[in-house]
Amino acid sequence: MKKRSITILYNSPVILTFALLSLLALGLGKLTDGWTTQNLFCVYRSSLANWLTYPRFFLHVLGHPDFAAYCSNIVILLVVGPMAEERFLLAIALTALVTGLVLWFFFPNGALMGASGVVFMLIVLASFAGMRTGTIPLTLILVLILYLGGEIFQAVTGSAGLAQLTHIAGGVLGMIFGF
């Protein structure tokens, strides 16, 4: 009888490392009673003289307020992310920076954390998978209507918050990266 073995493959290093770093950020937040979450993994208007302001523009996408928020973002990243692995690290960094700067400039009394902008960017980016020269995939159109359309509707009707702005920015960046 042939002996079988199972090998676990670290098949998507950017996505898996992002998921692990986010989990580590969540754990650090619990261990420090929220200090690291507030000071490292959440972007908000702070003095440009405060050196922690700059890493927050990028690190806020690793922060999550609780395990449920972590899971809702990371599961989508784990499912869709490996398809765009090659370009994903730069896309994460740019999405983090843009959403962090949008919050910093336009919402001086707000705070932002979580990977939902990155998730929206990835959802839209993944919708470009079937695109060929001269064609637009119906899946892309539906994603834009359902996901981004819903977020824009909430923004126009006044029921939107910072999360919707982050989702819209992530979706727009996903379209830019996709084209």
Image: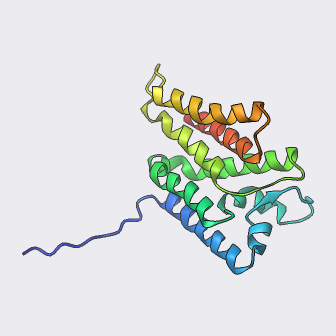
Seen at 64% across and 70% down, the residue is 26
Q: Position of residue 99 (x, y in %)?
A: 74, 47
Is residue 179 something that shows in the picture?
Answer: no
At horizontal 70% and vertical 31% (from top left) the residue drawn is 153
Identity of the residue drawn at 74% across and 68% down: 37
As drawn, is 168 to the left or to the right of 38? left
Expressed as whole percent of the image width and height from the top left, the position of residue 156 reads 77, 30
Q: Is residue 24 visible in the rendered structure shown here?
A: yes
Q: Quadrant of the N terminus?
A: bottom left
The quadrant in which residue 149 appears is: top right
Left or right? Give the position of 149 relative to 134.
Answer: right
Residue 2's place in the image compared with 105, above or below, is below
Name the residue at 69% across, 64% down: 65
- Report x, y in % for residue 83: 44, 47
**Residue 58 placed where, x, y %?**
72, 57
Q: Residue furthest top?
A: 134
